[in-house]
Structure formats: structure tokens, C-alpha cells
Image: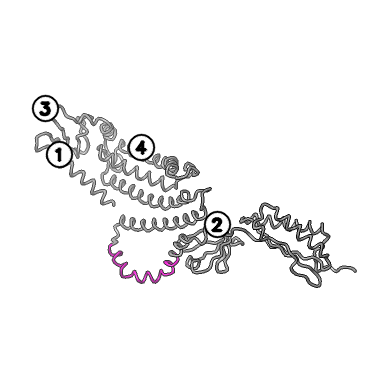
Amino acid sequence: MRRAIAGMRRSRATSAESEYVLLLAMGTVRPIERRSSIPRHIGPKDRRGVYHGVVVARTMQDGSESDTSKAEFPEGMLNDLMDGSEVLLGFSSGTLIVVIGLLGLSIGIGIATRRFIFPRLLGLLSKSERIDGGSLIAPKSLGWMMGFLAFSELLTWLDEVADPVWDASLAQNMIDLSFTLFVLGLLLALYRLVDYLDAFIVVEGEENIASRRSLASVAESVGHLAVVVVAAFVMAGMFGVDLNGLIAGLGITGLALALAARDTVANIFGAISIIIDQPFNVGDWILVEGIEGEVVQIGLRTTLIRSSADTLITVPNSNLVNSPVENFSQRRFRRIQPRFEFEADSKPEALKTFCEKLLAQVKEDTRAVKEDDSWVRVNAFGPSMVTVSCNFYSVQSAASQREMTEDILLMAKRVAAECGLIFHEPRMRRQN
């Protein structure tokens, strides 16, 4: 890449020299003695025509005055400022001041890009007004990237429009280094920007929010992998590594790599199957191969599940695809089945009244669903106790299920007291 940039600059220099030779042959230019800097007797109006120590004074065939007067600013002022003897590393004091000024301008461009321009661009690109692009801060690598690019371009511009007094090879190395750092910053910024896919794919309040989270999780994994692969090829090209032999060798070792990466490929296809079939999404509570918990992340190779003990379990995607998955979050309702045990000498009328009252009160609850399938019945008795079983359904929410279960238990205790029923306690011995 650096050789390509240098080639473009040599091409521009060759074009300018060819133009000068043509004008010299036509008799429309006059050469002057070559000097290391612009001669003192050349005024600002003539500095536009200076190229490598030669003044190209373009004149009309009819004797009209030169058109170089169009270039009074900024070339003239820059050349006046940078003119002088070398004081440090081949740079004149004026040139150092200009270069330091351009460096400060580049830093300002990088900060502005990261703090102001990038968040506003995100706000414009976002498809939903509920995403506040102004609240998103760009990664630091984006600011460095734009700063290095600006410094490289500003130095190139200075070299083209003016005649700075500096060490040409050192200046070229500065330009090439800045551009190389720009490329590195670009790759790092792209890797960081992949994380912002979640802000565009997942929008709170929209439908299918769970499937969008799953898609965003896989998209981020694919994006990170793509950036790493591209970065490897770009870095190899920048440092002169020959990739032809590597690419040719892939055909020979491709089979061996495919066999070695068989499980990895199976997991990647498993991730694709999960996204297409959607047996579960990020945030769902599932049970697979004895592992139960909440799906935290769906990656290219593995899926992360957080158990009820708050441990993080890593499951290969191929296992999830090839095994039955029980998704508790996809239930349309939640079942509540409390059971009550009363003393064996409880009166049948009291037990009947208890069942009827408890069922009626539960059906009045707004959280109860499937009322026709709800019941409270005496279903077993023994020498020391009578068992009453219940069957209720609540809405899908787990929190609602827990709250409703608590209310049913307290409700049963009150109704039992009203009916004169005593709960069975095996450890108690009744006195006759």
C-alpha cells in the first residue's frame, strides 16, 4: 500500500515535468537556476509556478501577463512562512511550526469525529427514533483513525501545494507511517463498531424482540470474524507478505483442515439452524440435555446458558440442534398445582365447601386463565389424612405465576379456617 502511494506521487511528478518540457519546447516558459528553496526575488504571485527549483511562467502568445497571479493564497503565505535554513532533522523552523499546526488540526478532527460526528451519523442511520444516536460514544480507535488519516492527507497536501523546507525522505516516512496507523485504526474501529449492530437490530418495544436479540448476537460474531479475516489479509499486504503461496497451499491442505475443523463447521451450521428455525431466542428459559437455564448469548460456535445457580454453561450449537430442547418461555400459560392435606376425621360437607369456595375465589382472579380446566377436588384419603388436589393456570409471566401461587396458598388457609378444617401434621399426636 505504501509503495502504491509513492507510485502515485511519482506519477504526478512525472506529469508535471512533462508539462514543463512541452511548454519549454513551445517557447512559453523560461528556466531559472535550480535552488534548494524558492529564490528571494520571486514574489508570492510567481510561487505557483515553482516546481523542483524551476519557475514555469505561463504567458499568452500575444504577450499578455502571466496567469500565475491566481495562486496568491495559501501557497505564497506558506512558502514565506516555511522559508529559511534547516534547524532540526532537515526542517526549517517555519516548516516545523506548520507541521505541528497540522498535527494539532488532525487531533481536533479525530476528537470531533468521535465525540460529535459519529453519534449524529448513528442517529441519522438509525431506522427508529427510539434509538438515541447522540448517547452512543464511538470507540477511541475511530478518533485515532481519523486523526492519522487527516495528518497523512494534510502532509501530502502541504507537499503538493507548497515548497516546505524539510528532509524529503523523512517527510515521506511520516506520511506513510500515518497512513499505516490509519489502516490499523480503521480495522480496530471496525471490530469495535460491530458491537453497535445490536443498537440497530434490537429496538425495545418492537415485535419479535427475542428473535432480534438472537440475530444480533450471531451477527456480531460473524462481523467480528469477518473483520479479523480482512485484517489478516490487509496486514499481510502492507508488510509485503506474499499471499499467493498461502492461497495455493490452501487447496492442498484444505481437506485436512476441513477434517480437523469438522466440529467447528458443525457448530457454525448449528448457529445458522438456530437462527432460521428459532427453537429458542436470547432470554428464553430452556432445558436441554439436563441443562436448564436462561439463554444469554448465541454465538457462531457455542450458546451460553445461565443456570438458576447463576453459573454460566457453554453448550456447543451442534448439541442444541441434535437434542430435544424444552422451551419454558414459549408456554402460553403456567400451571399451578397446589395440594392440601387435612385430618382424616374432617367432615365431608366441610371438605366439599372448601373445594367450592377455593375454586370460585381463584376464578375471580384476573391472572387466572383456562377456567374450564381449573378444578379443586378430593382425590385421595388414608388412615390419617384426606388429600385435596388443585389445578389452575396463570398467565405466561413467571413473576405472575409466583404471585398467584402465594395468593392461592393464603386463600386456602383462610377458607379452611372458615370451614373448620385442620391441616394434617404427621408429627402431632392428637389427644382423645
Q: Classify residue 2 as left or right of residue 289.
A: left
Q: Which residue is mark 1?
A: 20
Number of residues whose C-alpha sits closer than 10 Å to that of mark 3, classed few (under 14), some (14–19) or many (20 or more):
few
Crowding around mark 1 (Cα neighbors within 10 Å: few <14, some 14 to 19, many 20+) is many
Q: Nearer the viewer, mark 2 or mark 3?
A: 2
Q: Amino acid at mark 1?
A: Tyr
Identify the residue position indicated by label 4 in the image.
Answer: 101
Magenta region includes residue 249? yes
Q: Nearer the viewer, residue 179 or 317?
A: 317
Residue at x 87%, y 68% (from the top left corner): 430
Label 1 vs 3, first from the N-terminus: 1
In this view, which residue lies farthest toward the bottom?
383
Mark 2 residue type: Gly
Which SS type dominates the magenta stretch? helix
Regarding mark 2 in the picture, which secondary structure is present there? loop
What residue is shown with label 3? 63
Residue at 29% over, 46% down: 170
Q: Which residues are magenta?
A: 244-267
Residue at numbered disc 2:
283
Q: Earlier in the sequence, mark 2 or mark 3?
A: 3
Q: State the residue lying farthest toward the right.
A: 432
